[in-house]
Amino acid sequence: MLQTPEKLFRKATDLGFNCSTNWQEHCIQPADADANWQLIYKNGNWILLVNGVPQMHLKYSEVIAFLERRSSSREALAGNSLLTASSVRLPVA
């Protein structure tokens, strides 16, 4: 059984990501079901998977940086959507 990376899972959860673990790997993925990526910890390495295909190995610090960037870009997109929607003016009849 793997030891759960408590500190990393706590940080990921605080940033809005889902974390899980089983007997052979840890997994961090976005709460958005349509997202196409996930991070898994398997055999001593964090691996970024995109559409189920391994892309790269990440160090612990790189995992934190990746999650922080994904979280801030998601917040920025949500903020832009709100700004765009609130700035639309409908013609007065």
Image (cartoon, rainbow, N blue to C red):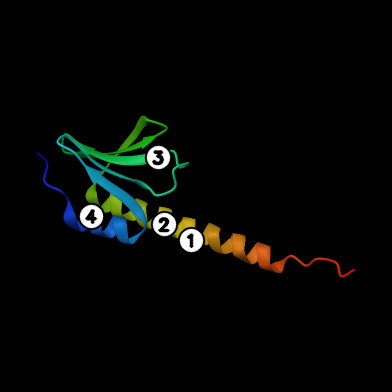
Label 3 and label 1: CA atoms lie apart by: 17 Å
Q: Nearer the viewer, residue 86 or 71?
A: 86
Residue 4 is situated, as x and y percent measured from the top left of the image, at: 15, 48
Amino acid type assigned to the residue bearing label 1 in the image: Glu
Q: Residue at point 37% right, 30% down?
A: 52
Q: CA distance from mark 2 to mark 1?
A: 6 Å
Q: Secondary structure at mark 4?
A: helix
**Residue 81 or residue 53, whichever sits in front:** 81
Determine the residue located farthest toward the top in the rendered image: 53
| Residue at the spot of label 2 | 71
Disc 2 marks which amino acid? Ser
- Counting labels gives 4
Q: Are marks 3 and 1 in contact (CB under 8 Å)?
A: no
Q: Which amino acid type is marked by label 3?
A: Trp
Q: Secondary structure at mark 2?
A: helix
Q: Are marks 2 and 1 in contact (CB under 8 Å)?
A: yes
> Measuring 27% from the left and 59% from the top, which residue is drawn there?
11
Q: Which mark is residue 8?
A: 4
The front one of 55 and 24 is: 24
First in sequence, mark 3 or 1: give its number: 3
Q: Which residue is mark 3?
A: 37
